[in-house]
Amino acid sequence: GQQVMQIPQYQHVQEGEDFTTYCNSSTTLSNIQWYKQRPGGHPVFLIQLVKSGEVKKQKRLTFQFGEAKKNSSLHITATQTTDVGTYFCAGGKAAGNKLTFGGGTRVLVKP
Amino acid sequence: NAGVMQNPRHLVRRRGQEARLRCSPMKGHSHVYWYRQLPEEGLKFMVYLQKENIIDESGMPKERFSAEFPKEGPSILRIQQVVRGDSAAYFCASSPKPQETQYFGPGTRLLVL
């Protein structure tokens, strides 16, 4: 079955630094979505990417969908303590009936 | 437009009891998904339902777990004869169509003593 892997599993970042987290699918995707879960909270939708090579920005967050539509990345610049949480990617297949979530990247920010 | 509602938010059960978790999707959403999350772990898909139908239950344990989404009322995740290993956060999400954005509820945190 379809697998979605995220690396790294944990990301320790110094406040103010940049980092990137990656999402890789075993199969070609029709779309990829990113969610953020704050500690003790529930996942909240951030963004959806549909087109090959698509890049979208939300303030300090930059999301990219790979040319082959099998991978995606999330880049955060000038990390802040409010960025703490777990970032999940979720991939959908054209013939599929649901999203498949990755295991998440847990981001910890050192002040 | 109210978001996804889940109740109870916290549930404590003793081993062997039954747990019933409820989920009311967002208005206009007919697709419901249930996930389980252990502390410090990811979201594990359990079951996907559309009104009165189970579409995909590939993540559901074969025994003790069942789910329904009746024509009227909330979706129910039922766990019979709970064991300590069932302790986890159970999240429900809904979407208007398959593979569209999923909106998550606040979760039910189940603790089995």
Image (cartoon, coloured by chain):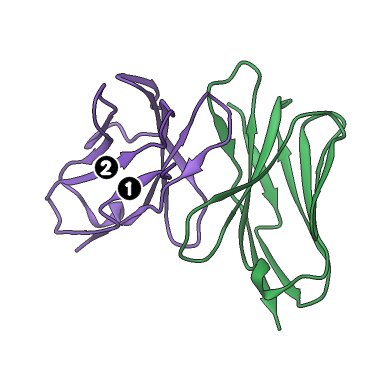
Chain colours: A green, B purple
Q: Secondary structure at mark 1?
A: strand
Q: Residue at x 67, y 75 (%)?
A: A81
Q: Is residue B43 above or below residue A90?
A: below
In the rendered structure, find residue B22 and report the number of the disc placed on it.
2
Q: Residue at x 42, y 37 (%)?
A: B26
Q: Is residue A107 left or right of residue B88?
A: right
Q: Is residue B66 left or right of residue B29?
A: left
For badge 2, the amino acid type reads Arg
Q: Quadrant of the C terminus of chain A?
A: bottom right
Q: Is residue A16 above or below residue A55?
A: below
Residue A58 in the image: state x and y as whole percent: 77, 53
Viewer-nearest residue: B47 or B63: B47
Q: Closer to the N terminus: mark 1 or mark 2?
A: 1
Inter-mark Cα distance, 1 to 2: 6 Å
Label 1: chain letter: B
Q: Determine contact: label 1, label 2, CB under 8 Å.
A: yes
In the rendered structure, find residue B88 and report the number of the disc placed on it.
none
Q: Which residue is mark 1?
A: B6
Q: Is residue A62 left or right of residue A25?
A: right
Q: Residue at x 26, y 36 (%)?
A: B76
Mark 1 neighbour density, 10 Å: few (under 14) some (14–19) many (20 or more): many
Q: Secondary structure at mark 2?
A: strand
